Image (cartoon, helix red, strand yellow):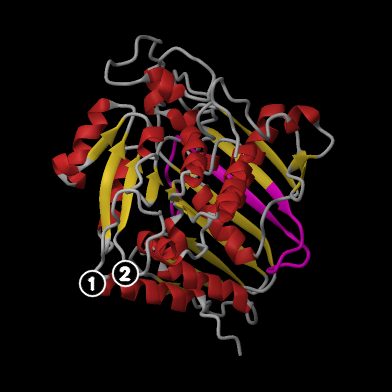
């Protein structure tokens, strides 16, 4: 019998440690190496002080034995409230994250910027000897994600993706259901995100950026564009900065799917959609989108399986608005943040009662897991490569949508097969002077 702890045992140990606290911790002195031990206070900083960043910071602050050292943002109006929440005047503020990374008192950073700024700070943090909690998705292209993976390996850093569902108890129990074979042979996974963004985001004119925002720095490696409120506020819906909900929300789902199915990346993808419900709107990604990815043989099905993804922005009505269903020959299972429900296939006599099993749980230990991994220099379950593979399906469906045809994917070489136009979209060019280098 293996002595290696199960994932549930690991998370239970982590949660217990967090609850008990790390008494007697010592703060690192200026210039100390960024390697906190099991009983040392972990000093961390926040890069990106929007709503998600501050939520991550609050969750990290709840973990005993942590301390916020600094916050960083390109929008001055976001710095003051983040600083106040972190502890007031004793908290350092930075405009340029590269200056923050020079601070030797910081052992770890949260990267919670908008999507096109996830990878460069992650790489630079690894180079500076910091561990990283980076929000999903991992970059706005597959090439960016691969660069982050290689940087974590090269500099031997802990990089954990912000897919917090990976640390929730009911998702762990649902994984055990799939791996037990109770669902039978799973031939299809359906994933959906339904939101009500109607009538759309409008079409405000280009203009001057607000004085508190460093617009050119915000654009960074993305192409130079005039300021538009929608580019900044609704950046999820612009090709330069994000991938629509099929990437930016759905990474949560894909990570769970890969975990349960024992899969990594698909072998083909298609994508269709358009502006089918919004009124006047100047954003770029479809308001209604469907994509399908084909996967080869995996642990849950030696014949492979299909992933079907749907985003709808004009109607939220659905059994659950953000969820996934695993369809097996013995039963199906729907999973979301409220819990999971298993429905057996109706077999036997007509009218025979079908019994459903439902399990629900609450609690988020993802940030405590990250701190434990930092303390013990352990590879996270939701590590950077897991995040990279979880970002790939949405990127591939988007590439297929942009070129208007099915694409075939080599998951080993991470290249589109026999389609130079599509393959050119695997990595985005960077605007000078920014470079994607590790």
- In the rendering, at what x and y percent does residue 215 appear? 39, 19
Q: Residue at x 51, y 33 (%)?
A: 242
Q: Earlier in the sequence, mark 2 or mark 1?
A: 1
Res. 275 visible in picture: no
The residue labelled by disc 1 is 23
What residue is at 56 percent from the left and 21 percent from the top? Answer: 431
Mark 2 and mark 1: Cα distance apart in space: 7 Å
50 sits to left or right of 197: left
- The prevailing secondary structure element of the residues shown in magenta is loop
Query: Which mark is on residue 39?
Result: 2
- SS category of the residue bearing label 2: loop
State the image coordinates of residue 170 (x, y, percent, origin top left): 43, 69
Residue drawn at (54%, 26%) of the image? 434
Q: Nearer the viewer, residue 193 or 421?
A: 421
Mark 1 falls on what kind of element? loop
Extreme-bottom residue of the structure: 1
Residue 95 location (% of width, % of height): 32, 29
């Amino acid at each position: 019998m293996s002595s290696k702890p199960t994932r549930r045992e690991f998370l239970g140990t982590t949660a217990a440690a967090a609850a008990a606290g790390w008494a007697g911790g010592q703060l690192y002195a200026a210039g100390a190496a960024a390697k906190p031990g099991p009983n040392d206070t972990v000093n961390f900083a926040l890069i990106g002080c929007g709503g998600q960043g501050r939520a991550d910071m609050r969750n990290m602050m709840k973990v005993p034995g942590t301390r916020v050292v600094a916050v960083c943002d390109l929008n001055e109006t976001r710095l003051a409230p983040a600083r106040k929440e972190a502890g007031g005047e004793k908290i350092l503020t930075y405009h340029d994250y590269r200056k923050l990374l020079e601070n030797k008192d910081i052992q770890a950073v949260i990267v919670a910027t908008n999507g096109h700024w996830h990878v460069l700070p992650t790489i630079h943090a690894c180079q500076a000897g910091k561990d990283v909690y980076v929000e999903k998705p991992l970059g706005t292209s597959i090439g960016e994600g691969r660069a982050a993976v290689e940087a974590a390996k090269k500099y031997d850093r802990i990089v954990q993706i912000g897919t917090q569902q990976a640390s929730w108890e009911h998702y762990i129990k649902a994984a055990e259901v799939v791996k037990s074979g109770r669902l039978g042979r799973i031939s299809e996974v359906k994933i959906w995100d339904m939101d009500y963004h109607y009538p759309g985001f409008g079409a405000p004119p280009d203009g001057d950026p607000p004085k508190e925002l460093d617009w050119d720095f915000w654009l960074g490696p993305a192409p130079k564009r005039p300021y538009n409120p929608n580019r900044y506020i609704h950046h999820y819906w612009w090709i330069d900065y994000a991938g629509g909900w099929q990437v930016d929300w759905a990474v949560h789902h894909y990570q769970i799917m890969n975990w349960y199915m024992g899969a990594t990346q698909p072998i083909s993808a298609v994508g269709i959609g358009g502006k089918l419900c919004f009124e006047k709107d100047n954003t770029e990604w479809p308001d209604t989108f469907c994509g399908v990815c084909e996967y080869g043989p995996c642990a849950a099905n030696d014949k492979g399986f299909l992933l079907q993804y749907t985003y709808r922005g004009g109607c939220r009505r659905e059994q659950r608005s953000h969820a996934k269903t695993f369809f097996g020959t013995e039963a199906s299972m729907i999973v979301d943040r409220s819990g999971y429900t298993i429905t057996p296939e109706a077999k036997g006599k007509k009218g025979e009662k079908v019994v459903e099993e439902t399990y629900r749980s609450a609690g988020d230990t993802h940030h405590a897991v990250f701190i434990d991994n930092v303390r013990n220099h352990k590879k996270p379950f939701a590590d950077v490569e897991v995040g990279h593979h979880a970002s790939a399906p949405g990127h591939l469906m988007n590439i297929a949508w942009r070129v208007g045809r099915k694409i075939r994917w080599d998951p080993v070489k991470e290249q589109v097969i026999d389609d130079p136009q599509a393959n050119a979209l695997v990595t985005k060019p960077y605007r000078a002077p920014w470079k994607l280098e590790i």
